[in-house]
Amino acid sequence: MKRTVLLSALLLGSQAFAGEFLVKYTNTNGFQAVQNMGTMKAVGMQVMDHNATASLIKVDIAKSKEAQTLATLLSTPGVQYVVPNFKLKAYSAPVDTATLKSQWAIAKVQAEKAWQRAGNRGNKNVIVAVIDTGADYKHESLAPNMIPGYNFKDNNADPMDKTSYQNPGHGTHCSGIVGATGLIDGGTIGMAPGISIMPLRFLDENGSGDLNDGIKAIDYAIEKGVQVISASWGATVPRATAQPLLEAVKRADDKGIIFVAAAANDGKNNDSTEVYPANNGYPNSITVAASNSSDSKPSWSNYGTAMVHLSSPGDGIISTLPKNKYGELSGTSMATPLVSGLVAFLKSQDSSLTGAQIRAILQTTGTKVSIQTACNCRVDAFNAVDAVLTKKMIVVPAAASIGAKDTLNLSVLNGKSPFKYVSSNTSTATVSDGGVVTAVANGKTSITVTDADGKTASTLDINVGKSGSSQPQPPGGGGDDPAQPPGDGSCPIGDPSLCQIICQIKPDLPFCKQ
């Protein structure tokens, strides 16, 4: 009997490498203070690693001294925050072999028609960093598109994907969805077989890794100048606990790198569930739910009008596996690299496109489906590339959810100024001559823009009134500065009972003030 594998790399909020924490310092005094503490036996702390780019120090603290040492660290001048070094785990099961003709997802998104429309299948100068378990870069369907990567798990230049029962080849599978060549009989083809793939390994052969190495991988991709990062993993943790991960995504955003993230496989609504990096809220990020062959949402896929941007095929996806094998896996982990490949394909046609613009293009050209996302759509490669090549006028962002009294700045891609903006429901939100949307009351509206040549374009739904009591605020939307941990009682350590002890020792710490 054929078995479909539901696979994702999950950051488990309740698990961490015992005693390991990441300390964020803000200046040289803070750095030196943490280093000095690591030499004091009475503190019971050992410095294990240093990420200068992220200003993070990984430390190991003896359990018997944990509360006191954490309290001391958190109150040290020059130390911004301390969070646990989370454990990441990839789950897997046996897979099936298949042939090239079995790739329903490629047909569903009209990839072949898209390649014909563009006259190419991507550009080698466009690089997608697949941050995962590494990849079998020698695979017959991957080797021509692979460029050197790195192994942050073992700290060497060999990002080979090593398999076990827990990991059948997650990173290799994701890489094939992005850009397998399609040149091997009985093989597979990726969404963008003409681009380059950089494998970055931070999960080991047992499917385990740590947050510290994941952050290093993001920073490495930034340093090497990739255009797209594909991240098929995440964390269901409070925003304060995910702080160093969010900062890494922000560094990518600042460099114009498009960050494509999986929505997660818990079957939950991300609008009321804090999932990171999926819920990061940065302009260059695209968060992906999964669809199946009938354009329905698999029961396990996360969703959300505010925090999930679109859907993509992720159920029963055939792709590459290590040692020249092929197999079928399922998950938002599989939906994400298809979008990453599509983003790279669009960047190959117009390198100036930003993540926010590509997200708007994908949302406005996607096929309407009954999957709850910002666009209620599934990506369509042909419609997207046709919009790029014809320079279709697009409003950016194309869909959004904002809170009461929030504002949203609109821009127009491929239009001629001056622009005239009109709100379809002024009782919900108004829009200024400059394209600033101002929320008035809960509800929905859309904005229509007319340019100087008389061309028009409209947004999808602009929702006012975010759902979910635990809805995280994206930066710039009236929420906390993402560079600062909230002073609202949120426990950055991830363990409320430990935070209670710390607050008894140091009651003036920000998260101790209710």
Image: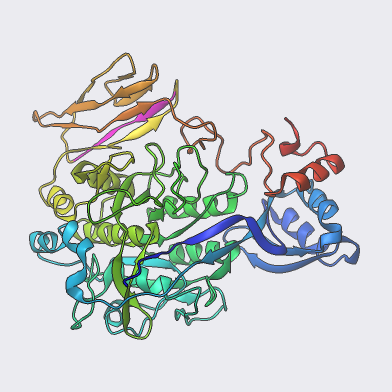
Question: At which x and y percent is residue 200?
Answer: 45, 71
Q: Is 405 situated left or right of 193 in this image?
A: right
State yes or no: residue 191 in magenta. Answer: no
Q: Is 239 situated left or right of 300 in this image?
A: right
Residue with the most extreme front position:
1
61 vs 443, nearest the viewer: 443
Image point 39% across, 40% down: which residue?
304
Q: Could one spot residue 227 in this view of the protein?
A: no
Image point 40% across, 37% down: which residue?
306
Question: At which x and y percent is residue 207?
Answer: 53, 71
Image point 14% across, 47% down: which residue?
387
State yes or no: residue 411 in magenta. Answer: yes
18 vs 242, nearest the viewer: 18
Q: Could one spot residue 68 in this view of the protein?
A: yes
Question: At which x and y percent is residue 119?
Answer: 9, 65
Above or below for 326 versus 348: below
Residue with the most extreme top position:
427
- Work out which quarter of the rendered image holds the C terminus and state it: top right
Above or below for 382 versus 392: below
Q: How is the image coloured?
A: rainbow
Q: Which residues are magenta?
A: 406-413
Above or below for 36 versus 163: above
Residue 136, by quadrant, is bottom left
Q: What secondary structure do most residues of the magenta stretch adopt?
A: strand
58 vs 255, nearest the viewer: 58
